[in-house]
Amino acid sequence: MSHGSGSAFSGAVKDFMEYIGVLREIDSVIDLARGWLQLSVLVAIGERSVRVDELVRVLGQPRKAVLDVLRKMRLKGLVEVRDGYYMLSSRGLHVYKLLSSIVNHGGFERRSASGQSYAREATVYDVVSSITRFLYLYEAIVALGSARGYELSLDTLASVVRIGERQLDEYLSVYATGSTRIFERRVKRCGLIARRGCVVYKLTREGLMVFHRLPEYVRVRRSWATRVLVLLTRALHPRIVLKRLTLFLSVGSAMTMSLVALYPELSLLLLGGWVLVVSFLALLVSRGL
């Protein structure tokens, strides 16, 4: 990497980390993984006052859904209503300005899916789409960071992120080329019986630099429970960890019951031992995730 491209990448990493800090502050108010409609309402209102009918028209959502979201946002202190007009509270305006700074003033997500920078004022859909893409990117980096060889197939990543393979490939491929190259994308032969070509993503050296600055990686270094979970499951992303622990518990329970049936005189010892194992794993999950 040349000095110029290295400087450009360092700047991009800095923007990325600032983006993470801003989104974490927003996520403490709005659950970004599930509160996309709250996010859309907040951006649609912005710095003005609107009636419910206008929000319904702009968002294209049922009136009942919009009213329900407005009720939840009033309870959170994000919106106020006066004479039938909804407006953001001081807290809501703070979150709105944080969002505006993300989309309009830099960071990794100043790109569209095709890699082009925004050349106009961001709309509601630009903001929500930008944040959504960032969350997918973030989850992919966390999943890859603790995978063997820092590599996972696209179908595995899609199941972790919970979107379609084609859509995720479109989002991630933007960062597999150019000066901010976080991933290496390639096609390899997969499958034990029917060998087929499948897309695989791997963290580059620069991608590992980003991963090592994420809060999840810092938590591994500071938490013994997280370190043990990563050691046991070879994963750091919560969905992968829980999926592998569930498989382990299912197999372990079946084996324990089989041994109890074969050696009934040892049933108390076997069941007691298995209860201790399950309790220890529950402790790890409560402290490490």
Image (cartoon, rainbow, N blue to C red):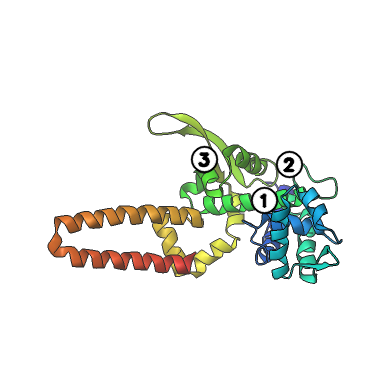
* Label whose residue precedes the other's in the sequence (1 or 2): 2
In percent of width and height, residue 282 lies at: 40, 66
Foreground mark, 1 or 2?
A: 1
| Crowding near the residue tagged with mark 1, few <14, some 14–19, many ≥20 C-alpha atoms within 10 Å | some
* Label whose residue precedes the other's in the sequence (3 or 2): 2
Which amino acid, by three-letter code, is at mark 2?
Gly
In percent of width and height, residue 62 lies at: 71, 50
Cα gap from disc 3 to disc 1, whole angstroms: 19 Å
Assess whether mark 2 and mark 1 are in contact (beta carbons under 8 angstroms): no
> What residue is at 61 percent from the left and 42 percent from the top?
168
Cα gap from disc 1 to disc 2, whole angstroms: 15 Å
Residue 244, numbered label: none
Label 2, on which residue?
Answer: 115
Which amino acid, by three-letter code, is at mark 1?
Thr
> What residue is at 77 percent from the left and 51 percent from the top?
56
> What residue is at 58 percent from the left and 47 percent from the top?
204
Which element is circle 1 on? Answer: helix
Label 1, on which residue?
Answer: 132
Which element is circle 3 on? Answer: helix
Foreground mark, 3 or 2?
A: 3
Label 3, on which residue?
Answer: 155
Which element is circle 2 on? Answer: loop
In percent of width and height, residue 104 lies at: 81, 54
* Label whose residue precedes the other's in the sequence (3 or 1): 1
Can residue 105 be seen here? The reply is: no
Tell me which corner region of the image, top left, top right, bottom left or bottom right, holds residue 72. bottom right
Tell me which corner region of the image, top left, top right, bottom left or bottom right, holds residue 81. bottom right
Which amino acid, by three-letter code, is at mark 3?
Asp
> What residue is at 64 percent from the left and 40 percent from the top?
173
Q: Closer to the camera, 229 or 151?
A: 229
